[in-house]
Image (cartoon, helix red, strand yellow):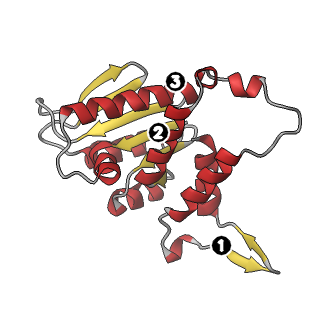
């Protein structure tokens, strides 16, 4: 899974701060590194600004960090990445910016709210050391075991923050059963991979 993160949008949502300092940026990137190593997901985090006129790209452990440069903003870089990765494996954009999420949706990229990422990162930080090794939990899973209270809780929280417009296809009621729309199925798939 490829996770594209609108860094300042997410940081401002989860910290309720107007200004994000270097220490907060570094702490956020470290959390993302821990998450990336634990889950094996590709993480690309994009910040506004930088010292160059063009985007500056660097690796911080397993996380790719991009500063948009002073001629572009993070949204421009994220839109370019959405187009670049739209035909790859599962791709998700983490942002609460409606315009950016709409662009991502129209390019086949699922958008996940910033609050869900915060919950996922807190869960990753609380995980026991052995579970941080990729594949450990799968190798020691009981036969026929299908449910996890942590996953169930994450799924419930994710459904509270899903940004779906009326025309995107809200679930319909058929014979007393709720069926998921295409958008809801795609979001559920992404959340399960987080």
Label at residue 34: none
Mark 3 to mark 2 CA distance (whole Å): 13 Å
Residue bearing mark 1: 171
Callout 2 environment at 10 Å: few (<14), some (14 to 19), or many (20+)? Answer: many
SS at badge 1 = loop
Q: In this view, does 143 lie to the left or right of 150?
A: right
Write the residue at 38% across / 40% down.
81
Write the residue at 48% across / 72% down.
165
The vertical placement of 165 against 139, above or below, is below
SS at badge 3 = helix
Circle 3/circle 2 CB separation < 8 Å: no
Q: Using the rendered view, name the quadrant where residue 84 is placed.
A: top left
Mark 1 to mark 2 CA distance (whole Å): 26 Å
Looking at the rendered image, the disc whose residue lies closer to the viewer, 3 or 2, is 3
- Which is more toward the observer, 73 or 151? 151
* Sooner in the amino-acid sequence: mark 1 or mark 2: 2
- Which is more toward the observer, 103 or 191? 191
Residue bearing mark 2: 3
Callout 3 environment at 10 Å: few (<14), some (14 to 19), or many (20+)? Answer: some
* Sooner in the amino-acid sequence: mark 1 or mark 3: 3
SS at badge 2 = strand
The vertical placement of 14 against 34, above or below, is below
* Sooner in the amino-acid sequence: mark 3 or mark 2: 2
Q: Using the rendered view, name the quadrant where residue 71 is placed.
A: top left
- Which is more toward the observer, 120 or 167? 120
Which residue ends up furthest to the right in the rendered image?
Answer: 143
Residue bearing mark 3: 37
Question: In which quadrant will I find the C terminus?
Answer: top right
């Amino acid at each position: 899974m490829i996770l594209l993160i609108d860094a300042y949008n997410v940081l401002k949502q989860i910290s309720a701060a107007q200004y994000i300092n270097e220490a907060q940026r570094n702490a956020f990137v470290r959390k993302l590194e821990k998450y990336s190593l634990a889950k094996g997901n590709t993480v690309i985090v994009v910040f506004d600004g930088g010292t160059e006129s063009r985007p500056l790209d660097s690796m911080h452990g397993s996380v790719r960090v991009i500063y948009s440069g002073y001629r572009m903003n993070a949204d421009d870089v994220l839109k370019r990445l959405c187009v670049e990765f739209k035909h790859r494996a599962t791709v998700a954009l983490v942002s609460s910016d409606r315009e950016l999420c709409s662009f991502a949706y129209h390019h086949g990229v699922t958008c996940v709210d910033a609050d869900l990422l915060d919950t996922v990162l807190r869960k990753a930080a609380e995980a026991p050391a052995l579970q941080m090794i990729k594949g450990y939990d799968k190798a020691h899973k009981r036969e026929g075991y299908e449910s996890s209270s942590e996953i169930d809780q994450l799924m419930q929280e994710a459904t509270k923050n899903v940004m779906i417009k009326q025309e995107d296809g809200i679930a319909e009621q058929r014979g007393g059963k709720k069926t998921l729309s295409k958008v809801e199925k795609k979001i559920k798939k992404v959340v399960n991979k987080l």
